[in-house]
Image (spheres, rainbow, N blue to C red):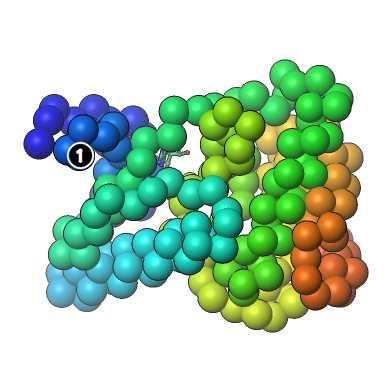
Amino acid sequence: MNKKDLLYQGAEAKICVSKYMDFDVVEKRRIPKSYRIKHIDNRLISYRTKEEAKLMIEARNKGVSVPIIYDIDLKNGIITMEYLKGSRIKDIFNNLNETEKKNLCLKIGRNIARFHNNDIIHGDITTSNMILVDDRVHFIDFGLGEKNGEVETKGVDLHVLMEAIESTHSKYSEYFKYVLEGYKKELKGDANQVIKKIEEIVKRGRYR
Ligand SMILES: Nc1ncnc2c1ncn2[C@@H]1O[C@H](COP(=O)(O)OP(=O)(O)O)[C@@H](O)[C@H]1O
Ligand SMILES: [Mg+2]
């Protein structure tokens, strides 16, 4: 194993750059929590690692770009995956021109529909969790994801992105409509039902 460079340190996980055979990879390592009972913590870490990897593999099989998984270490809570050498959407979005922003949002919407078509819920769709490599949007961080076919859950999944765009790219919040446009084009079910849910969630928030 080569020298590991820390790329990112979060509360739940640490991302290190490393090598796996000849590939540049990142290792996503879940951080043990000392306030949790040790064997419960171990089980939780191993469960979440497994769930995240399963969703990534399924998303990839359904045509969504996600990092290739090279290794899963359930005991230590480590997923070794392809290092995406691209740009986080969060870092580039504001600097794109109007057409580029629109096209990117259409593409994001199409991709979300692809995993929703298979009842894959990402759970944390933000512009930090999307990396653009060449002209392909890759999704990372399925750590809060699940399999769920309910319209409500799909609505919540999209609403998270709506709020992320409103807070991180507030000048461009109207571009979310293009996410929905792309979503509608690709979704196999009735996208309007999902969109209605988003509207309900927004209303609920307003009158809370
Ligand atoms: N496969 C990858 N390739 C390149 N960068 C990555 C990759 N996975 C994670 N990162 C970087 O690390 C950050 C945190 O990873 P993420 O899986 O989102 O962890 P967390 O669950 O803590 O948010 C991402 O925002 C991204 O910048
Ligand atoms: Mg993340």
**Quick one: quadrant of the C terminus?**
bottom right
Tell me where residue 103 appears, x and y as whole percent.
80, 35
Residue highlighted by disc 1: 20
Query: Could you tell me which residue is drawn at 80 percent across and 75 percent down?
Result: 189
Q: Nearer the viewer, residue 104 or 31?
A: 104
Q: Quadrant of residue 201?
A: bottom right
Query: Could you tell me which residue is drawn at 43 percent across and 46 percent down?
Result: 67
The kind of residue on which mark 1 rests is Tyr
| 2 lies left or right of 133 | left
Query: Could you tell me which residue is drawn at 66 percent across and 67 percent down?
Result: 116
Tell me where residue 101 appears, x and y as whole percent.
79, 30
When the figure is inspected, residue 115 is found, relative to residue 6, above or below; the finding is below
**Quick one: quadrant of the N terminus?**
top left
Tell me where residue 144 appears, x and y as whole percent.
49, 62
| 127 lies left or right of 106 | left
Q: Quadrant of residue 200?
A: bottom right
